[in-house]
């Protein structure tokens, strides 16, 4: 019986702790998206208010980072918009790092491809 309550407490604690770290709820364009036209912005939605502390975008062919302005950094919000310069055809990978309201740093990456049909 004690083992049952300990397991239940641990599961509930881990569930609440995971939710407190403001994970990414959605991103547009979606990870793995195949786009006929280049996006003009990347939209990120977190489950809770977060601050983007770093955002990098690179074209996979050649690996060069795309130059972005930094007005989207360190703004506390649930929704973040990263404006993009004109993008050429190809596959792009975005890497990001954010800080939740609790100070916990989270990070991730996603990619999309621009290929006219």
Image (cartoon, grey):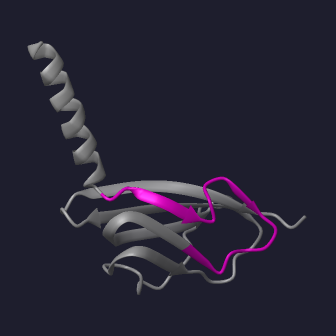
Q: Is 87 displayed left or right of 107 in the figure?
A: right
Decide which of 66, 15 is in the foreground and name it. 15
Q: Quarter of the image containing the N terminus?
A: top left
Q: Quadrant of residue 60?
A: bottom right
Decide which of 84, 12 is in the foreground and name it. 12
User: What residue sits 22% from the left and 46% below the top?
Assistant: 17
Q: Is 25 displayed left or right of 63 in the figure?
A: left
Q: Quadrant of residue 50?
A: bottom left
Q: Is residue 27 magenta?
A: yes
User: What residue sits 30% from the left and 51% below the top?
Assistant: 19
User: In the displayed structure, would residue 36 be above or below residue 14?
Assistant: below
Q: Quarter of the image containing the C terminus?
A: bottom right
Decide which of 56, 49 is in the foreground and name it. 49
The magenta-colored residue range is 22-42
User: What residue sits 14% from the left and 22% below the top?
Assistant: 5
Q: Is residue 50 magenta?
A: no
């Amino acid at each position: 019986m004690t083992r049952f309550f300990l397991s239940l407490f641990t599961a509930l604690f881990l569930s609440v702790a995971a939710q407190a770290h403001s994970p990414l709820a959605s991103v547009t364009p979606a990870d793995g998206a195949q786009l006929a036209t280049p996006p003009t912005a990347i939209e990120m939605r977190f489950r809770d208010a977060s601050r983007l502390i770093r955002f990098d975008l690179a074209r996979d062919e050649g690996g060069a980072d795309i130059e972005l302005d930094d007005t989207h950094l360190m703004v506390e919000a649930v929704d973040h918009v990263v404006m993009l310069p004109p993008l050429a055809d190809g596959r792009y990978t975005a890497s990001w790092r954010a800080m939740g309201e609790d100070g916990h740093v989270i990070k991730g990456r996603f990619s999309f491809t621009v290929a006219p049909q």
